[in-house]
Image: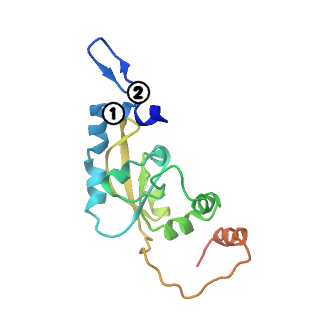
Amino acid sequence: DSKIVNPPKIPLSNTQSYSPSVMKQKKYLDAHFKSGNIIDYLSSDETRFRVFPIGEFKQNNRLVAFNIESTNGYHPAKLSIYENFIKSKAEVETIVKLMNVKYFLSPQKFSNKQAESLSLRRVESGKYYNNFRYLDAYLYEYLNFEPRVQFLSNVNYVESKQDGYSLLKRNKFD
């Protein structure tokens, strides 16, 4: 549809107009592409990893602008097998390890006791631009991080996808 590719101009005044997309306003674009403490920290990590955004940061794909991989993907049209896996209610630890998660990005500060119980260590904090505003953000490193490539010692055969998802729901998936 031509209205998506070339949206109509909406007049603000007799001398100025703008497109309906708020992201076309320079102040929002500048803020979106400004890095900050969190992005700088992630960009300095030379290993291959993914970030697991939680809370308000879950629906934001801003990390892709800095070539930082996220568990949320980069496009609303995700593969159905991926969506089914995420919705399978598998143990969080299983999902995190299989998806190569090294960091959690949270708008919530965990107490030391909470972080320790989740095998997390706070490595950075600062302001993070999310949905057109800056929010407090906390970056936690997952201490049980698994490398991207893993060699399997055995394979479990299952009869169906549902059986596979059930296997993933176990406490300690190997």
Task: Give the number of marks.
Answer: 2
Q: Percent position (x, y) of residue 73?
A: 47, 56
Q: Secondary structure at mark 2?
A: loop
Q: Specify the amino acid type for callout 2.
A: Pro
Q: Percent position (x, y) of residue 120?
A: 43, 62
Q: CA distance from mark 2 to mark 1?
A: 8 Å
Residue depicted at 25% across the width and 62% down the height? 44
Residue depicted at 48% across the width and 84% down the height? 151
Q: Specify the amino acid type for callout 1.
A: Lys
> Is 161 placed above or below 114 here?
below
Give residue 24's mark.
1
Residue depicted at 33% across the width and 33% down the height? 24
Q: Quadrant of the C terminus?
A: bottom right
Extreme residue toward the right, this view: 159
Residue depicted at 62% across the width and 64% down the height? 90
Q: Percent position (x, y) of residue 161?
A: 69, 69
Snapshot quadrant of residue 173:
bottom right
- Disc 2 to disc 1: CB gap under 8 Å: no
Give left or right: position of 71 versus 44: right
Please tell me how crowded label 2 is: few (under 14), some (14-19), or many (20+) other residues with Cα within 10 Å: few
Viewer-nearest residue: 61 or 23: 23
Viewer-nearest residue: 102 or 16: 16
Please tell me how crowded label 1 is: few (under 14), some (14-19), or many (20+) other residues with Cα within 10 Å: few
Snapshot quadrant of residue 102:
bottom left
Give left or right: position of 13 versus 96: left
Viewer-nearest residue: 80 or 53: 80
> Is 53 placed above or below 99 here?
above
Extreme residue toward the top, this view: 14
Residue matched to label 2 = 20
